[in-house]
Amino acid sequence: MAQKEQLQKHLKERWGELFQISYDLFLYDVTSTYFEGKAEKNSQAQRGYSRDHRPDCKQVLIALVVTKEGIPLGYEVFAGNKHDSKTVETIVQQMEERYGQADRIWIMDRGMSSPETLKLLGQDNRRYILGTPKSLLKKFEAELAKDDWEKVRDGLEVKRCSSAFGNEQEIFILCRSTDRQAKEKAIRERFVQRIETGLGSLQKNCACGRLADVKQAERHIGRLLERNRRAAKFFAIEVKEQNGAVQLNWSKLERQLTGANLSEGCYVLRSNVKEWTPEELWKAYLQLTDAEEAFRIYKNDLELRPVWHQKEKRVKAHILICFLAYVLWKCFGQMCKQAGLGDEPRKVIQEIKKLQLTDVILPTRKGVDVRLRCVSTPEPDLAMLLQKLKLKPPVRLAPNQDL
């Protein structure tokens, strides 16, 4: 892995030469990949929060920095039980050593948000746009109820708010999505309905004497709320013994339900880029989807997961090869974009796969066969595609050369 740093520096130079990439926005995100096997010889293989829904397996974290075009700039591997926010300092230092610090805006999701992250990004004139935990919406309940939202597009509104912590260097952007609101409301109503149905059944059991013990009723209620914890805070429940029978009373907490109605579909961004409009900040934050898309390609197309290697060096080599494969993927995507073919190379690659390599064997009078490796002539549509990409496949390959 000694060549990893040199490779990343080389990529920085080549990206600039080939595609005139801008480095004004750094999009940072973290994912995990799990191991098949015990991975006992890898100290970084630990159990932690699994994005692959495999908490039973050990994993490592992979931190990735990309540009606003989704171009990969660098990555780092961390222990699988490390919190996302604890990776920020290492990545920021590495990127600043490689690309400099001036005129950089860091964009990170809410998993990176922590007091330590904010302190780091608030130093040395760094600039940032961060997602925040949903719990922060409580500080903006009054703003959520107002009608001074700014429409960005159909189904999305934003508004600018002053700092909730008295920091004049920061601003907060409230965002409200209609689609997200409908989804969160449907989820909440489903869990509320489940609790109502369960409490109704328990109430009948108490009334007919099937539940004659308070502690037994409390255990039933506890299990019901645990299964539907997302809606548990919306209910006030009282269990008591009266005249030798268990009495169960419950009601909905309207104030909590009203607050949920206001906050559903909403999220908060915080930033020290005060000269941008709320719309510009939201659009910049939305580009984090490029980092998320990178991880999807990593895991699915490039087969990053699962990791079958057990030794730490081999694991890191596997991740490096996947990173370089993704570099080639994005490089080809930029070539497609320049050719007016969009920046998604998957379909183009499928078309190019139609090129075939054929071995032609010619016998001679001396008994020695002459073997020629010939490349098939592309069909007219494929030939036009290759011409747009400025690619010219060879007619013939050397005996030991692959296409």
Image: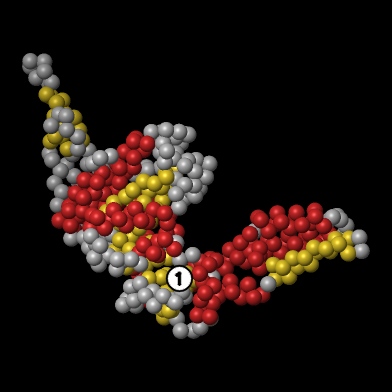
394 with respect to 92 (left or right): left
Q: In the rendering, at what x and y percent does residue 117 appear?
A: 40, 61
Of the 4 image quadrants, the one containing the N terminus is top left
Residue 41 visible from this viewpoint:
yes
Of all residues shown, which one is farthest toward the left? 365
Residue at image location 43% in from the left, 79% down from the top: 162
Q: Residues within 10 Å of mark 1 (few under 14, many from 20)?
A: many
Residue type for callout 1: Val
Residue at image location 25% in from the left, 62% down from the top: 101
Residue at image location 47% in from the left, 69% down from the top: 267
Q: In which quarter of the image is residue 18?
A: bottom left
Q: In this view, does 351 lie above or below 239?
A: above
356 with respect to 186 (left or right): left
Q: In the rendering, at what x and y percent does residue 337 appear?
A: 23, 59
Q: In the rendering, at what x and y percent does residue 278 appear?
A: 37, 76
Q: What element carries label 1?
A: strand
- Judging depth in this view, the residue of 274 and 390 nearest the camera is 274
Q: In the rendering, at what x and y percent does residue 222 appear?
A: 71, 56
